[in-house]
Image: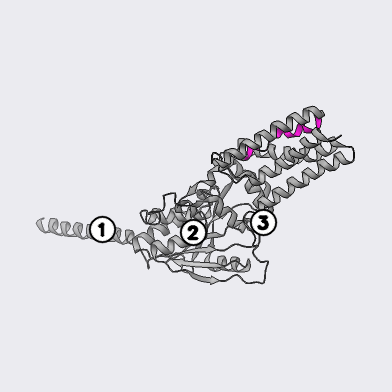
Amino acid sequence: MKKTLIFGAIFLALALLCSAQAARAELAPSGPAPVIDVFTMGPGDYLFSRFGHAAICVTDADSPSGRCYNYGTADFSTPGPLTWGIVRGNADFWVSVVPLARMLAIYTFENRTLYRQRLPLDEATARKLATTLHAADVRSATLYHYHHFNDNCTTRIRDLIDTATAGKLGEGTKAPLDPPLRSYVYAGLLGEYSALAVSELALGRLIDRPSSRWQGMFLPAVLRSEIAQKFGAPVETFYERSDRGTAVPGGHPRAGTLLLAFVGLALAGLILLGARIGRPRLGRTAAALPLGVIALALLVVAVASPAAELRYNETLLILWPTDLALPFFSRPATQRYCQLRLLGLALCILASLVHLLIQPLAGPLLLAGLPLLAAWAIARFWK
């Protein structure tokens, strides 16, 4: 009986030991440590690509050839609804997962410069980050509402790296010591004159304050610079954009201002032409319609959007939807209305000079001021 008890105890101890070893084996990581690469892409030929792009890739036992996570995926086949969704703050973006070789082929085909940085992470951090990324294989788990400055393909990667490294990427980057975000918008839209003009009209005062480097990492180029600095990760050029495609446009960052001034001058010319041919109401209509429609569109965007950079827009002090009524005024009423509008524009100029208004308002002021001045002069002096 005693021998039976002894053998039973020995057997139980061995069974417990084996199960503990098996449990440890299950918990222990298998295979070599994951390799984490951050890829940043230069601008391409189309407008949506002008600010660059970023992706993060994992090479491990589960993905020996490399698997890349792209947080900037959306339905780009419907640019109208997508743009309105971004304005409304409910545009759905998600993560697409592709093999490394395929991702490289896609951006090489698009003729976009490709940079790679390998993150020098310890094994535990690399495994933690890889596990988080692999959870993105389920598309429904990765849906998010896109915001150009605060939540995009690049900020998602910034936040993943910062969380995995206990805040190392964000160290010392939160102070507002960098240029305003509008300077990044100007740089990204160089050569896109219409887009620059729209940005001056639609983007409000929030992006005209000094920004932080953390905010600046919404751009792939800034993220690339910070990763190199914080982690000592050298930048490798995988592919250099060639001259076989459309050249990335250049130009002056304030070209949008010049375009708005030209449109304002053209509208003033229409008013003068209408008076010249004896049809002053027709001239006022030709100028008031675009001015009023633009003002109404900006007002709708400001009311509909939760984004502060679209809601708090000083251009709304300059462009008024009431200009749509200008063709219906009598000559004395036209004179009085234009005097009121020009006085309002003068106050906006004064407020800009004393820095109460901080947006670049020269373009909107010329867009509205030149035709209003022409309409006032016709009503006041034309016989």
Query: Quick check: can you spot residue 331?
Result: yes
| Mark 3 neighbour class, 10 Å CA radius: few under 14, some 14 to 19, many 20 or more | many
Q: In this view, does 60 lie above or below 316?
A: below
* Total numbered badges shown on the rendered structure: 3
Tag 1 residue: 20
Q: What stretch is highlighted in magenta?
A: 315-328
Q: Which of marks 3 and 2 is nearer the N terminus?
A: 3
Tell me the SS state at disc 1.
Answer: helix
Q: Distance between the residues labelled 1 and 3?
A: 65 Å
Tell me the SS state at disc 3.
Answer: loop
User: What residue appears at the point 77 percent right and 33 percent down from the top-left corner?
Assistant: 326
* Marks 1, 3: nearer the viewer: 3
The foreground one among 289 and 255 is 255
Tell me the SS state at disc 2.
Answer: helix
- Image location of residue 320, percent across then percent down: 68, 35
* Residue 319 part of the magenta segment: yes
| Mark 1 neighbour class, 10 Å CA radius: few under 14, some 14 to 19, many 20 or more | few
Which of the numbered marks, if any, corresponds to residue 222?
2
* Residue 20 part of the magenta segment: no
Tell whether label 2 touches label 3 (CB within 8 Å). Answer: no
- Image location of residue 97, percent across then percent down: 53, 59
Residue type, label 3: Glu
From the viewer's perspective, is 372 left or right of 37?
right
Quadrant assignment for the N terminus: bottom left
Q: Specify the farthest residue to the left.
A: 2
Which of the numbered marks, if any, corresponds to residue 317?
none
